Image: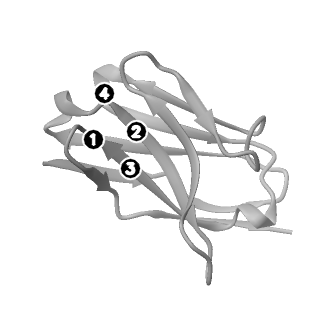
Amino acid sequence: QVQLVESGGGLVQAGGSLRLSCAASGRTASIYAMGWFRQAPGKEREFVATLSWSGGSTNYAGSVKGRFTISRDNAKNTVYLQMNSLKPEDTAIYYCRATDFGRHYWGQGTQVTVSS
């Protein structure tokens, strides 16, 4: 089992920045990818960014490319999401996901609210 704890959400004005963190614990040696997803009220959960745990390759949704950056600290088993130039449409609950060779694991989510 892998446990994930997100932090760093909050309220920010449009154009501002936030950094989310996701700390993994448990069977972290089996993780090969981690990522961020988000869910706005009344909408489906959507992909934001992913990162390969070994090679560090990244992938972003078109709506956040150039504004968000996913990174990792292997020693701390932590993945980050640096969010710049935030827009009101980025308002959502942000979830961290870890993937091993058997399944996905989800964090509890952290709220990000961007005011106009």
Give how far apart the Cα atoms at labels 2 and 1 are.
10 Å
Q: Residue 1 placed where, x, y %?
A: 13, 48
User: Which residue is denoted by mark 2 in the rendering?
Assistant: 34
Q: CA distance from mark 1 to mark 3?
A: 10 Å
Amino acid on which disc 1 is placed:
Ala
User: Of 57 and 115, which appears nearest the observer?
Assistant: 57
Secondary structure of the residue carrying tag 4 is: helix
- CA distance separating discs 4 and 2: 14 Å
Specify which label sits upstream in the sequence, 2 or 1. Answer: 1
Which of the marked residues, 1 or 3, is nearer the chain's N terminus?
A: 1
State the residue position of label 1. 24
Residue under pointer 4: 76
Measure the C-alpha gap from mark 4 to mark 3: 16 Å
Give the percent coordinates (x, y) of residue 38: 56, 61
10 Å neighbourhood of mark 1: few (<14), some, or many (≥20)?
A: many
Rounded to the nearest angstrom, the CA distance separating label 3 from label 2 is 6 Å
The reply to whether the C-beta atoms of the residues labelled 3 and 2 are less than 8 Å apart is: yes
Q: Secondary structure at mark 1?
A: strand
74 shown above or below 1: above
The residue lying furthest to the bottom in this view is 42
Mark 4 or 1: the one toward you:
1
Counting residues from the start of the chain, the first of labels 4 and 1 encountered is 1
Label 3 secondary element: strand
